[in-house]
Image (tube, rainbow, N blue to C red):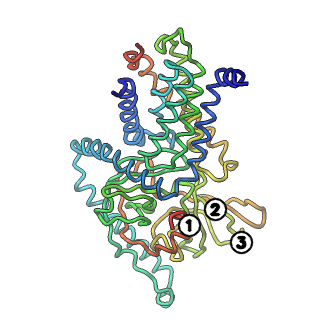
Amino acid sequence: MQRFIRKYFVEYKEYIVLILFLIISLFALPLNNSSKLKKIKTYSFATYAYLNDAADKFLNLFVNNCELNKLRLENAKLNLRNNLLRERALENAELHRLLNFKNSSSFKLAAARVLSKTTSKTQSFFVINLGLNDSVKLGMPVINDRGLVGIVNNVSNDFSVVKTFKNSEFKISVVDQRSNFNGIMSWDGSNLYLQNVPTSADIQEGDRIVSSSYGTLFPPLISVGIVAKKEQSIPGLLSSVYIYPFVDLDRIKNVFVVKIVLSKKLHDVELNFRREEE
Amino acid sequence: MINKEYIIVIVIFIFSALLQLFFVPMITIYGAYPDFLIYPIVFFALRKGQIYGTTLGFVYGLFFDLVSGGVIGSAMFSYTLSGFVAGYFYDENRKPSELSPYSHLFIILLASAISTFFYSALGINNLNNILNSLLLFAAFSGIYTATISIPVILLKPFKILEN
């Protein structure tokens, strides 16, 4: 028997090793939200981020970005303000008072550099050079001068991981700025989309999509994108609405952290953040 | 005393991961990207065999998941498979530098496409909707990685590690 097992192992050892490692990898996937693993991840990415930071600083020796960064910050503030004005043109003053409309242009923005990016189609993460020491907290929205980028997903003392909108776990409450139709936007690996939208919903190609005031993660009126197309998923009943984002994540180098956490408890529920920790 | 080879493997990982996380995002084409971690995995799999390649893929994947801030398990899974596939082409009587450039290119393309596909596929809930686009994306990324590898294959920088 022992000889048989030994012979079997010697003959198929490559496959046994492969299956063992694949099983370990698959078991690791659902453990990503456990607090112990998160601590290890935080420590690891923060340690390695120093290398990325050094490489970034070395490259920046040859480029003077100071003026450009100032302009980008100004642009991001103007973008938020512009959305507010657009909204005000669409709604009347009485409705504003009723909704207790929030002035998103007054949010404090902290400029950050993107140090590294994962390039996966479905799990896009950035590492940025701001952390707990810069008052960055888990759940803070991240934008750039064109609009939404993502949300702070993990924070160390000097660095943070940003879960971008090109991540299948990223979900955000959005609104069609023209018709005020609300929906939940997510990423399917190729497109940003609103799923299960009633076919009768007033959404047209070219409509501007912004973050909704119903959301607890993001302040309202952060630019997200425009409606690219509307396709019927169940004929006559439901449609999928595809959104073309304003921000090109492939080219992005500078971002701004919006220094607010709207409602920690609510957003933990909404995004299933740290669901095993608490 | 740590084996000298382990130090080399670690140094190669640090350099490759730095390229992958810092440099590669600057050269993506329509989201497709070259995979710099594939080169050492393929080289060591061709040099040391399938078990070594599989194990190295697993270890590199684990460390890459940790340092990238991504989902732990996805790169582990995909690089393990890549190491295993590259190890298929191992021949104990042949050094990797003796492999024809076309075979070398093919192995890198295959390993890279497999790793890219699974790395992206493991992060999605409903694979049916985008299976075709992911396959296309993986093939394109594989071709991109193989194209970038041409100087590596011709200049044979890993040859110094063969003895």
**What secondary structure is found at the residue carrying circle 3?**
loop
Q: Distance between the residues labelled 1 and 3?
A: 15 Å
Query: Where residue B131 sits in the image (x, y, percent)?
Result: 67, 44
The residue carrying mark 2 is A241
The residue carrying mark 1 is A207
Disc 2 with disc 3 on a shared chain: yes
Query: Where residue A45 sits in the image (x, y, percent)?
Result: 39, 49
**What secondary structure is found at the residue carrying circle 2?**
strand
Residue drawn at x 49%, y 10% is B98
Query: Where residue B42 sits in the image (x, y, percent)?
Result: 50, 25
Q: Nearer the viewer, residue B152 or B92?
A: B92
Q: Which of B49 and B97 is in front in this view?
A: B49
Q: In this view, does A87 lie to the left or right of A196?
A: left
Amino acid type, residue under disc 3 in the picture: Ser
Compared with B41, B93 (above or below) is above
Amino acid type, residue under disc 2 in the picture: Val
Q: Is residue A64 left or right of residue B50?
A: left
- Lower position in the chain sequence, tag 1 or tag 3: 3
Looking at the image, the residue that sits furthest to the front is: A2
**Quadrant of image for the N terminus of chain A:** top right
Q: Residue B102 carries which label?
A: none
Q: Is residue A261 left or right of residue B42?
A: left
Compared with A16, A194 (above or below) is below
Chain letter for the residue marked with disc 1 in the picture: A
- Lower position in the chain sequence, tag 1 or tag 2: 1
Report crowding for label 2: few under 14, some 14 to 19, many 20 or more residues within 10 A (C-alpha): many
Chain letter for the residue marked with disc 2 in the picture: A
